Amino acid sequence: MNQTFDFIVVGAGMVGAAVANGLADHGHKVALIDQAPEPPEPAEDVPGIRVSALSVGSERYLQQLGVWDRMLAMRATPYRRLGVWEGGRRQSSQGLSLSSPRTVFDARDLDIPHLGHIVENQVTQKALWDRASEQAGITLHAGSGVQALSENGQLITVTLVNGEKLTGRLLIGADGGNSRVRQLAGIGVNRSQYQQQALVATVRYRGLPEDITWQAFHSSGPRAFLPLHSAAPFFTGESWASLVWYDDPAVLAELKRLDDDEFIARVRAAFPHDLPDLTAVIDRASFPIARQHAHHYFQDRVVLAGDAAHTINPLAGQGVNLGFQDARCLQELLDEARRQGLDPADSQVLAQYEARRRPDNQRMMLAMDVFYHLFSNRRLPLWVARNLGLGLAQSLPFARNQVARYAVGIDEGLPAPVRALLDRLPGPWRDAQPSPRV
Ligand SMILES: Cc1cc2nc3c(=O)[nH]c(=O)nc-3n(C[C@H](O)[C@H](O)[C@H](O)COP(=O)(O)OP(=O)(O)OC[C@H]3O[C@@H](n4cnc5c(N)ncnc54)[C@H](O)[C@@H]3O)c2cc1C
């Protein structure tokens, strides 16, 4: 029997599964589709290689969706401090040895218990999927992707690769950076590929789980440490962590070829002394990094959310946090549209969504670009300037805390001085305005 849904969500990744749950919680009838099979139970002995730093704002949203406790019951590691510093010492042309100032944000300075959690993507996705499968308002379709879209009056129909057809009033494309929905809807993107790639490694180290996540900046790219849960009972006295090494693709290809002992030795030599004592490396994978922004967030009966709409440099770990903000915003506007008796695909409703989300996403992209270009630059004056910047931040707790509140998702707007700085940036970084609709 053919049934008509209020919403068809394509992509049951973290963002799509979140928006589907939020809509179903408010009584909407939703079809949730993913080309991948149903996510399996996360393995108990080894963490998944893809992890995300989830902000306090994302935690609140996931609590509202009723999945946060399930995630904690699987595993999620809180971090109370966040450290940022310039990698190593450096010699100036005058022979001066310049030290490496650090900035450490501490949850205690903000009167909160933690700054965020490091969570495996598979844990977040599994919790959202399990919740979705309990919801009477959600019909799940796993294992077959989208093949075609067609619109007919007040409805949109999606044809899956397996030939199945589903009909709804609005289609939400949350199918990631290579979104098929975006292509089928004819929405273009601005895209630039960074020269760096990211190598992610799952490692074990001696000791209890650390309460700090840190990032050391080098001109070849940052190197980051993200703490995960205890490795007990399988490895008593050890813990898991995820390391991220951004660098030239050729360097990362060589690192991937090394055997485990050689890889650990290279990491020890290249990461700051704060790195705990590594005992094993379990998995390594590299990811290309691109900055990509859809020209429009909606077209007729299709609207985009998460990476389908915007992909940002992961160096400050904000991608899915922005995606969750899209999801929450879209869900609120669609609830309001129903209260007012409006068509959910009403262009004014969807334009409001884009007007609320595009500037925030754009600003975060710009901020990541500023970081990327500032820290990739080998010239001394810039090096000094950025060190002064970090040193200044360290010495001004108030300014630091404003930035930290934004980064952890307590405040939703960028602090005014940062906004002013970004607004003054030159041309190519600014595509904040969507291109005119034709
Ligand atoms: C190295 C690295 C580190 C990162 N670290 C962080 C971090 O610390 N914090 C953070 O916030 N973000 C981080 N990110 C970004 C984050 O991973 C993404 O922003 C996030 O995964 C986007 O979620 P999504 O649900 O929008 O898309 P995705 O996670 O890409 O999910 C898309 C879903 O759509 C499905 N799909 C795809 N095509 C189709 C189709 N044709 N039909 C049906 N289904 C389809 C896929 O199977 C998938 O389930 C990182 C990214 C990288 C590369």
Image (cartoon, rainbow, N blue to C red):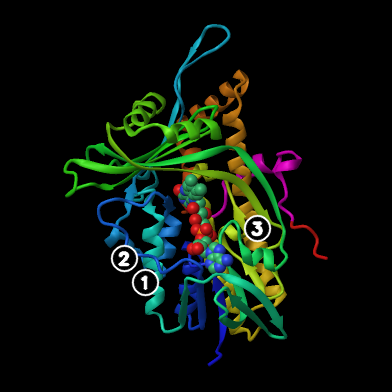
Measured as percent of width and height from the top left, residue 31 is found at 51, 79
Mark 3–mark 2 Cα distance, whole angstroms, equals 31 Å
Dot 2: element: helix
Q: Is residue 245 above or below residue 132?
A: above
Q: Amino acid at mark 1?
A: Asp
Q: Quadrant where the C terminus lies?
A: bottom right
Residue farthest right in this picture = 438
Tell me where residue 38 sits by quadrant: bottom left
Residue 205 within the segment the image draws in magenta: no
Measured as percent of width and height from the top left, residue 254 is found at 47, 31
Dot 3: element: helix
Q: Amino acid at mark 2?
A: Arg
Dot 1: element: helix
Q: Is residue 77 left or right of residue 54?
A: left
Residue at left offset 68%, top offset 49%: 191
Q: Is residue 293 left or right of residue 250?
A: right
Q: Is residue 70 above or below residue 318?
A: below
Mark 1–mark 3 Cα distance, whole angstroms, equals 30 Å
Q: Residues within 10 Å of mark 1 (few under 14, many from 20)?
A: some
Along the polypeptide, which appears first: circle 2 or circle 1? 2
- Please provide the residue range marked out in magenta: 411-433
Q: Which residue is label 3 attached to?
A: 358
Which of discs 3 and 2 lies nearer the camera? The answer is 2
Q: Amino acid at mark 3?
A: Arg
Residue at left offset 64%, top offset 69%: 303
Q: Which residue is label 2 attached to?
A: 70
Residue at left offset 29%, top offset 60%: 74
Q: Which residue is label 1 attached to?
A: 130
Which of discs 2 and 1 lies nearer the camera? The answer is 1
Residue 424 within the segment the image draws in magenta: yes
Measured as percent of width and height from the top left, residue 416 is found at 60, 45
